[in-house]
Image (cartoon, rainbow, N blue to C red):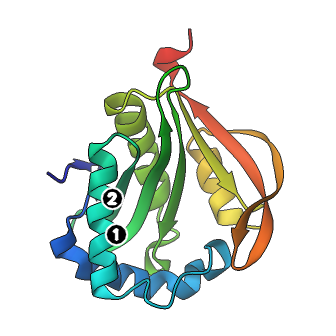
Amino acid sequence: MARSWTTERLVLRQVPPDESEAVRAYGLRSREFHGPWDPIRPADFWEREVVARRLAHELDTAASDAGLVLYLSIAEDPDRIVGRIAFHNVVRGFSQSCTVGYGLAPEATGNGYMTEGLTAAVDRVAFGELGLHRVEAAVIPRNTRSLRVVERCGFIREGLSPRFLKIAGVWEDHVRFARLNPVMEQ
């Protein structure tokens, strides 16, 4: 069953496969904008059937406690997806950590939506419901908008990882950030 959370202006929710068209529309609107910051995608990445399979996989991943993908909508228009926050690589045991990735549609930038959504997702979902101790983010140094988001959300810069991820076909350096769950600091 898909879950959802709300903030003052946003709805953050899992999306079931039967709503693949909304995710597809977001992806098609955003792919050129996200191009410099994303890996190269297969040619069929935004086809409806492929998106539906990916959404089913996201729900399975959440059910197995390995990750959680949330799609963002503005509260006044909850059927139009304008962003995505993905908690990947959930590690339990002595780590209790994950990585986070995020993106916003170009028409939604500049309004503080990602700062609002990411703060809520980390505090309420990753730290609250999932009970994680640490959330890590990696940002390409020239992606100044994304750097500002993680800083406003309270992530602390930990260092630089040379040639960390292959983005747009090139191994890119990334600045590494993390937030720790304040309840679990002991």
In this rendering, would 173 be left or right of 185? right
Could you tell me which residue is drawn at 59 percent across and 38 percent down? 154
Give SS at disc 1.
helix
Give SS at disc 2.
helix
Q: Nearer the viewer, residue 182 or 69?
A: 69
Q: Residues within 10 Å of mark 2 (few under 14, many from 20)?
A: many
- Circle 2: residue type: Glu
- Tell me the number on the disc at residue 41: none
Q: Nearer the viewer, residue 130 or 114?
A: 130
In this rendering, would 107 be left or right of 174? left
Could you tell me which residue is drawn at 29 percent across and 72 percent down? 53
Could you tell me which residue is drawn at 64 percent across and 37 percent down? 178
**Looking at the rendering, which quadrant does residue 32 occupy?**
bottom right
Is residue 11 visible in the rendered image? The answer is no
Q: Is residue 57 above or below residue 31?
A: above
Label 1–label 2 contact, CB within 8 A = yes
- Tell me the number on the disc at residue 58: 2
Q: Position of residue 140 (x, y in %)?
A: 74, 62
Q: Nearer the viewer, residue 140 or 62?
A: 62
